[in-house]
Amino acid sequence: MTTSTTDTIEAPDRREATGAKFSPSSMQYARSQSWRAVAQMADGIRPGMTEAQAQTHSMGVLKQMGMDRIWHPLIVRFGEATLATFKERTDPERVLGEQDIFFIDIGPVWQGHEGDAGDTFVVGDDPEMHACAQAASTLWHEVAEQWRREKTSGQALYAYAAERARALGWRLNQDIKGHRVCDFPHAIYKAGNLGDFGLCPRTGLWILEIQIAHPTRPFGAFYEDLLTEDDTP
């Protein structure tokens, strides 16, 4: 059957369907470009900047890199705001301190495919902030490796993530459960959260999100990336 550019390529589970233009290589390109963007954004964020200024700087990076568009709002969170979920509003005038923590979460479209990358950064030498930022990345990679090794469901992955977060001494935000991406827009497939998906997620279609909180201090960390067989963006 010939498909048009608006057709859907069906998968065994409808929640993993893609558009006729879907390309695994373009997904990888969107992934790698998103990580390059995050690195450039972080390099330009300095103490004394407000969240609003950091977002303006970060959007400038995406435009300079030639993104197609954004599919979700660009998020930069400082300090205590690193505990907020994606949909929660934070103070755009919050200022990054000399000893502080921040994360970046972007959702640009490249070559018609959805990138989604997020990471946490620390300014200063607060050891617990550095440990928290590293723990979010470590936990993400442990959960991703569990998926590769055991071929577990999305539900099981987030149960494992909560278990490992406790073991490492952090609290997992269980309201953040990952989601679909593909050729834009993925929203037409109504796939729901990765953490509610009862099957083993296919490679190159799902974003694994990890958000943790310090057990006693008011900050956290965030890390997200595309689940693929290749662990290197």
Image (cartoon, helix red, strand yellow):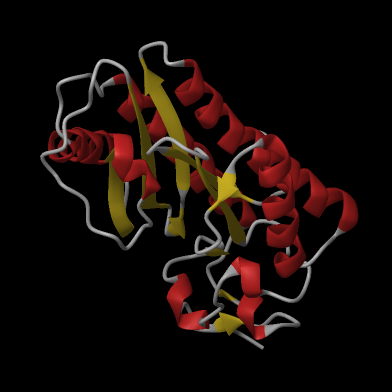
Instruction: Determine the image quadrant of residue 194.
Output: bottom right
> Which residue sits at x=42%, y=71%?
185
> Which residue sits at x=54%, y=77%?
192
Left or right of 90 on screen, residue 104:
right
Residue furthest right in the image: 150
Depth check, front residue: 137 or 42: 137
Say if 125 sits above or below 40 in the image. Answer: above
Depth check, front residue: 171 or 200: 171
| Residue 66 is at least partly visible in this image | no
> Which residue sits at x=52%, y=40%?
215
Instruction: Determine the image quadrant of residue 120.
Output: top left
Say if 86 sits above or below 122 in the image. Answer: below
Residue furthest left in the image: 93
Give the percent coordinates (x, y) of residue 171. Answer: 57, 47
> Which residue sits at x=36%, y=51%?
108
Give the percent coordinates (x, y) of residue 33. Answer: 45, 38
Left or right of 2 on screen, residue 107:
left
Give the percent coordinates (x, y) of residue 174. Answer: 56, 61
Give the percent coordinates (x, y) of residue 101. Answer: 36, 28
Say if 94 sits above or below 5 in the image. Answer: above
Left or right of 191 on screen, residue 43:
left
Location of the N terminus (image quadrant): bottom right
Location of the C terminus (image quadrant): top right
| Residue 140 is at least partly visible in this image | yes
Depth check, front residue: 1 or 201: 201
Residue furthest bottom in the image: 1
Residue furthest top in the image: 125
